[in-house]
Amino acid sequence: MLSYSVTELTDPHDFARWDAFVDACPETTFFHRAGWKPVIEESFGQRCHFLMAERAGAIRGILPLTLVKSRLFGTRLVSTGWCVGGGAALTEDAALPALDAAAESLMQRTGAAYIEVRDPARPHAQWPRKEGLYATFDRTTEAEEDACLKQIPRKQRAVVRKALKSDMTWRRDDDVDTCWTLYARSMRGLGTPVFARRYFRALKRTFGDACDVLTVATAEGAPLSSVLNFYFRDRVLPFYTGAVPEARTTGAADLMYYRLMRDSVARGYPVFDFGRSKVDTGPFAFKKNWGFTPRAVIHEFRLREGEAMPDVNPNNPKYRRMIALWKRLPLPVANTLGPWIGRQVG
């Protein structure tokens, strides 16, 4: 029986080893990168426990965990907090029990009510799970432009063609502040607390060339729609987006996503990862209208004895009044209060 040593990622010299494992292991995602540890700890004030299972001096498996302590939602371990993916990633199957044991020991020591794993590569057969709340979307973008346009269903394609003929401009740069300003406005409109501006800045500072922004503007340069993107292996992940209200009628968001597709495939990122959306919501329908096929996302849980399955999601009826109230807040008030709530969501 193989024996593994499980330790936490704390030594700065191990960050490069961790990321080398992430680059080599086919089960990893952008949300397994070591940079999430300092980003989360600095931006949200929550502690990360990134576990490494080693044998014979080499990393054989990893499990990034975030200890989210919240007055609103209790204490829990999430893989990975503030991300849409996580779970154990392995090069040796036998490393999984060692990582699971270390995670369960951590749950007991920290008083966490449960461990939540988002979209795991290796779901546990015996762990309770939730599915059907979220779906994710991705596909390979055709390299030739006409073929790319034909991937988009006819009605949506007409919107894109009209936007392409407009006088709107686009740029790809590192302007996270413009993106955050539009994102904050959109989040208030959805009744969702906004994350702090410093979080966007930390993402760019930490991930460097693997993080950028694409913004669509009027001919005069006024921003209409903007998206913060991540790049990993062969894929681009448009992750945080925002727009002014008039962007809906101008097709600014459609132009934004199309330009991101074309620019990314030209730069060697053919897979467009449209990301996770709640089922039967506006964003879910928008992605289907672009011709993307939804894939159900699993969230699995390891519950402390006596704990019930959690229900921390915006569809929970007890949060509806809060969402309705939030939509009516003045934007400066929402932007001031939002980060305090956002740091507890995880």
Image (cartoon, rainbow, N blue to C red):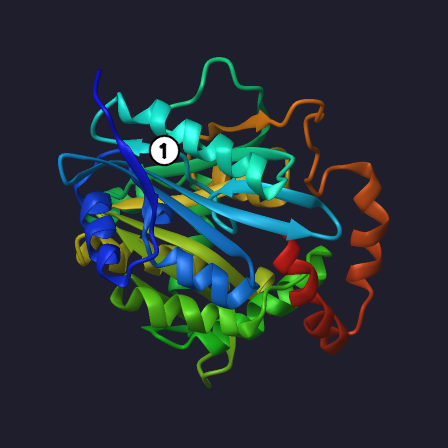
Q: Is residue 122 above or below residue 107?
A: above
Viewer-nearest residue: 198 or 156:
198
Q: Can the viewer see residue 83 in this picture?
A: yes
Q: Is residue 95 above or below residue 177?
A: above
What amino acid does circle 1 point to? Ala
Task: Specify the quadrant of the image occupied by residue 341.
Answer: bottom right
Query: Residue at the spot x=18%, y=57% of the render?
Result: 266
Viewer-nearest residue: 206 or 180:
206
Q: Can the viewer see residue 246 in this picture?
A: no
Tell me the quadrant of the picture where the N terminus can be found. Answer: top left
Helix, strand or loop at label 1? It is loop
Q: In the displayed image of the protein, which residue is found farthest to the bottom?
A: 220
Q: Is residue 107 left or right of residue 310?
A: left
Q: Is residue 57 left or right of residue 145?
A: left
Q: Specify few, some or many for label 1: CA neighbours under 10 Å numbering under 14, 14-19, or 20 or more.
A: many
Q: Is residue 150 above or below residue 260?
A: above
Residue 235 locus on image (x, y percent): 27, 47
Query: Residue at the spot x=44%, y=48% of the render?
Result: 49
Residue 125 locus on image (x, y percent): 46, 14
Query: Residue at the spot x=51%, y=55% of the render?
Result: 47
Residue 339 locus on image (x, y percent): 65, 66
Q: Determine which residue is flagged by label 1.
A: 88
Query: Residue at the spot x=45%, y=32% of the render?
Result: 119
